[in-house]
Image (cartoon, rainbow, N blue to C red):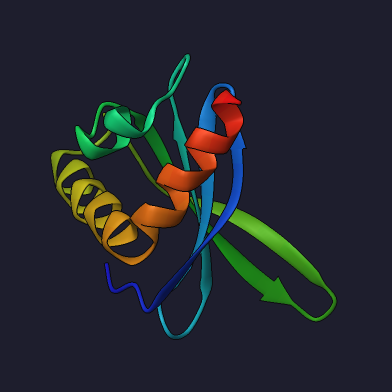
Amino acid sequence: MKVVSAELKAIRYNGVDVKVHNGLMGILVSMDKQNITFDDLTNHDVYTKVILLTRKCCSCSPTLIMESGVKEDDDKEILELIDRILELIGDDIKEAFEKEKR
């Protein structure tokens, strides 16, 4: 999946939400795990959902397009997506995890 830009939306106790843009549409990537750490992301040890945010006139309709553990091809693409996110904003995510620990 092509990723042009990424923005950290939230770090939760059980996950990380990142909004990515592929040059055409916004996509929300939700990476979940109990007591998640930055190492879980780098080791791909997270349950991931990729949600397309399709726009209609004045509203946004979320559509699940990929999910961990459903298709082998999707799993490979999710691993590449996580790597690209970490390449773009890995330092920001790591810094946010460190702030959460304080």
The answer to whether residue 59 is above or below residue 76 is below
Q: Position of residue 40 (x, y in %)?
A: 30, 28
The answer to whether residue 19 is above or below residue 36 is below
Which residue is at a point 20% across and 41% down the rendered structure image? 75
Q: Is residue 16 visible?
A: no
Which residue is at a point 35% across and 54% down the rendered structure image? 90
Horizontal relation, residue 76 to residue 68: left or right: left
Of residues 37 and 69, the one drawn nearer to the viewer in this rendering: 37
Which residue is at a point 38% across and 55% down the rendered structure image? 91
Horizontal relation, residue 6 to residue 57: left or right: left
Q: Position of residue 41 (x, y in %)?
A: 31, 36
Q: Which of the image's four quarters has the C terminus?
A: top right
Horizontal relation, residue 46 to residue 54: left or right: left
The answer to whether residue 45 is above or below residue 85 is above
Which residue is at a point 36% across and 34% down the rendered structure image? 38
Q: Is residue 47 visible?
A: yes
Horizontal relation, residue 66 to residue 79: left or right: right
Q: Position of residue 78 (x, y in %)?
A: 26, 48
Name the residue at the bottom extreme.
23
